[in-house]
Image: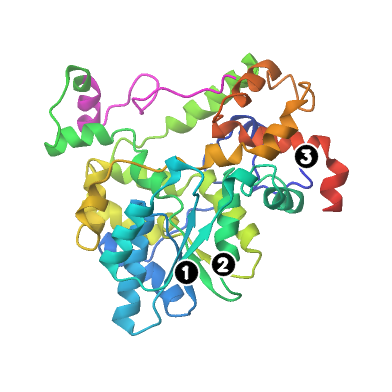
Amino acid sequence: MYTPYYDPHQPTWLEIASGLVIGPSPDPPRRGSGKPRTPWQAICELVTPAVLNPPCYVSFTGGRDSSGLLAAAVHVAREHGAPPPVAVTMRFPAVKSADEADWQELVIGHLGVRDWEKLTVDAEAGEMDLLGERSLGMLSRHGILWPFNVVLYSRVFDAVPDGGTVITGFGGDGLFERWSWAGLADVVHGTRKPAKADLRPLGRLLTGRPTAKTTAPDRIWSPHWLRPDARAEFTRVQSADQGSAHRTWANWVRWFGRRRWVDVARWSLDRIADGRIGVVHPYFEPELHDALIRDGGARGYGSRTAIMEAVFGDVLPERTVRRSTKAQTFAKIAWSVHARRFLADWDGSGLDDRVVDPAALREEWAKPAPDGRSALLLLALWLNRNREAAVRR
């Protein structure tokens, strides 16, 4: 699959085909200072350099992860008498499922934020379309970046003046939501009654004994648009990765921090920033990971909400900390006028049919909101059909 050039931080062919970046980082583990601190203290320390070297912007969606970082930046600014951070938010008026205005205003009012930039996105015109002008400019210049929705961050980055810094909540979902054993940790903490199906994995969690096939109780997802051999390879690689020991909270956090996808995402966002602005991702940082391990212990906090209460419960509105909803934004704006027009006359060629089943992929892409994990294949298809145009751009 074609990209203008290859960098080890770009997705591999299997990652492009599946939409997921899998496996451990090839780089040496990044280590924290070892200084004892709470997770809140660690986050505040991680955002301090950005706040004290204004202008400082916080990519703010109204979700719990970005709200917590905005709270930390506001706290640091007030503590040091620094200029307040600027919250920057994208709004999608044409997409009802992306409407977070009430949640955003709740947090902004609670924190007393005065500087708030709201960027209106014209989704109907395809402004954030995967094959829109903005996305194709990035694709032609950098090749395929991951994740597929990095184009959203490019709009936020454009709002930051030269020399400024933007704080992102990237990685929060991965760190706080995807620990496979979190449900059993709820049982251990007494916040959920055990079910019969919990007994065997609960015993493994408490004793540390490995499972027969994988340490994660959930099933491995497999892209239905891959050919059998490619799907088998994907399943093998993902199973090996999921099989890394992370039954304890501490092992999970360490495992998370050493994933290749963290490196690829950081690299991709740095390409978009282009050295013009600084970018800070507190949820990727070992200083925070060490604090979460020290504070959460082997069994962790329990649910996602329990983590939010422990870390941000004193600084965010209770409704925000306990919310269970999440905006569904990008699928509906990514596959818009430009992508649909491009695919209207697609004859199934342009991708390696030894890897991809064109009929299955066409079926997926015909859906109103296709699986986002198929998006990199669309970008690869455009590059394969427009090599000369990519070079000219």
> What is the three-letter code of the residue carrying label 3?
Leu
Query: Disc 1 designates what residue?
Result: 57
Residue closest to the eye, 236 or 324: 324
Dot placed on the residue nearer the N-terminal end, 3 or 1:
1
Please give the name of the residue rendered at 19% of the width and 36% of the height, measured from the top-left corner: 186
Mark yes or no: residue 36 visible: no
Query: Disc 2 designates what residue?
Result: 159
Mark yes or no: residue 339 visible: yes
Please provide the residue range marked out in magenta: 200-224
Q: Quadrant of residue 192?
A: top left
Q: Quadrant of residue 237?
A: top right
Question: How far apart are the two marked residues, 2 and 3, measured between alpha carbons?
Answer: 28 Å
Looking at the image, is 368 positioned above or below residue 94?
above
The reply to whether callout 2 and callout 1 are in contact (CB within 8 Å) is yes
Query: Disc 3 designates what residue?
Result: 383
Secondary structure state at the residue bearing disc 3: helix
Q: On the picture, is 251 further left or further right than 133?
A: left
Dot placed on the residue nearer the N-terminal end, 2 or 1:
1
Does 103 appear in magenta? no
